[in-house]
Amino acid sequence: MMTNLDLAGDGYISYTEFIAASLSSDTELGEKRINDAFDMFDTDKSGYIKVHELRAIFHCETGDKKMDAVIEEIIAKVDTGGTKEISR
């Protein structure tokens, strides 16, 4: 692993090489968390989060049927194609 961090190949890990490796692992961890969260909401595993999936989750968690307006707002903010779905 240490040889992977030594980008200059000089036998030492410089501060810049260390920071680059740290940022890379943070990005990978962030992407994994985003994918895990997406998978949690994509209950039918279609690759899309649909309005009915959000309703099922939010109504189940809060018991509040008034969440529909919030759900519609969430979809509207990220739905650039007008499909009423959220894709990866």
Image: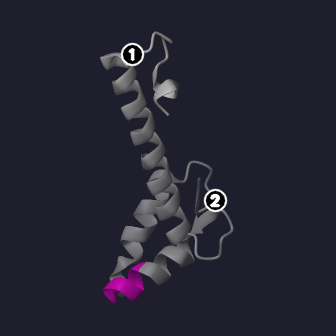
Task: Say whether residue 22 is magenta.
Answer: no
User: Viewer-proximal residue, 40 or 80?
Assistant: 40
Q: Is mark 2 on a helix, strand or loop?
A: loop
Report the residue marked by disc 2. Answer: 83
Q: Which residue is drawn at 34% across and 82% down?
A: 66
The structure residue drawn at horizontal position 52% and vertical position 27%, both measured from the top left corner, is 4
Q: Real-space Cα distance between discs 1 and 2?
A: 52 Å
The secondary element bearing badge 1 is classed as loop
Which numbered marker is on residue 12? 1
Where residue 70 sits, quadrant-wise, is bottom left
- Of residues 27 and 72, which is closer to you in this image? 27
Dominant secondary structure of the residues highlighted in magenta in the image: helix
Depicted 59 relative to depicted 77: above or below: below
Report the residue at 49% width, 83% height from top.
56
Q: In this view, does 49 lie to the left or right of 12?
A: right
Q: What residue type is labelled 1?
A: Tyr
Give the residues in magenta: 58-64
- Decide: few, some or many residues near mark 1? Use Cα within 10 Å; few <14, some 14-19, many ≥20: few
